[in-house]
Amino acid sequence: MDTYSLLRQIADSWVLLAMFTFFVGVGIWAFLPSQNAARKDASMIPFRNHDQTDTRPVDQKGQSNG
């Protein structure tokens, strides 16, 4: 058996199994109850720099009216 065929066989079976196992493991790890704080923190990323005190309307030039 030449090297290419051997590596191809290994990649088609064991590497595929290892990648699938890794994928399932990461999926399970991400949804563990201990990761709840990390999920909440990640969900608030878009709002971290949002200033909620300035609610005045903004015109088309980006300047506040008020």
Image (cartoon, grey):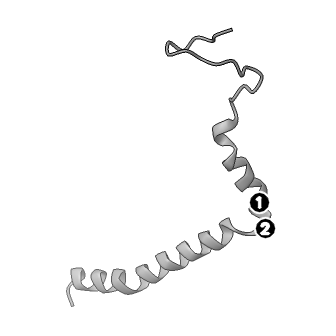
Answer above or below: position of 23 versus 14: above
Question: For this rendering, which residue is in front, 61 or 51?
Answer: 61
Cα–Cα span, label 1 and label 2 = 5 Å
- Residue 42 left/right relative to 60: right
Give, as a three-letter code, the residue at label 1: Asn
The C terminus lies in quadrant: top right
Please give the label number shown on residue 3.
none
| Label 1 CA crowd tier, 10 Å (few <14, some 14–19, many 20+) | few
Please give the label number shown on residue 33.
2
Q: Position of residue 56 (x, y in %)?
A: 69, 18
Q: Position of residue 44 (x, y in %)?
A: 70, 44
Tell me whether the residue at label 1 lies in contact with that at label 2, contact meaning CB atoms closer than 8 angstroms. Answer: yes
Seen at 77% across and 60% down, the residue is: 36
Residue 38 image-quadrant placement: bottom right
Q: Secondary structure at mark 2?
A: helix
Question: For this rendering, which residue is in front, 40 or 19?
Answer: 40
Q: Position of residue 33 (x, y in %)?
A: 78, 67
Seen at 75% across and 27% down, the residue is: 52
- Residue 11 left/right relative to 65: left
Total marks placed? 2
Seen at 23% across and 85% down, the residue is: 5
Residue 9 image-quadrant placement: bottom left
Residue placed furthest toward the top: 66
Seen at 60% across and 69% down, the residue is: 26
Question: For this rendering, which residue is in front, 2 or 9?
Answer: 9
Q: Secondary structure at mark 1?
A: helix
Q: Which residue is mark 1?
A: 36
The N terminus lies in quadrant: bottom left
Give, as a three-letter code, the residue at label 2: Pro
Q: Position of residue 21 (x, y in %)?
A: 54, 79
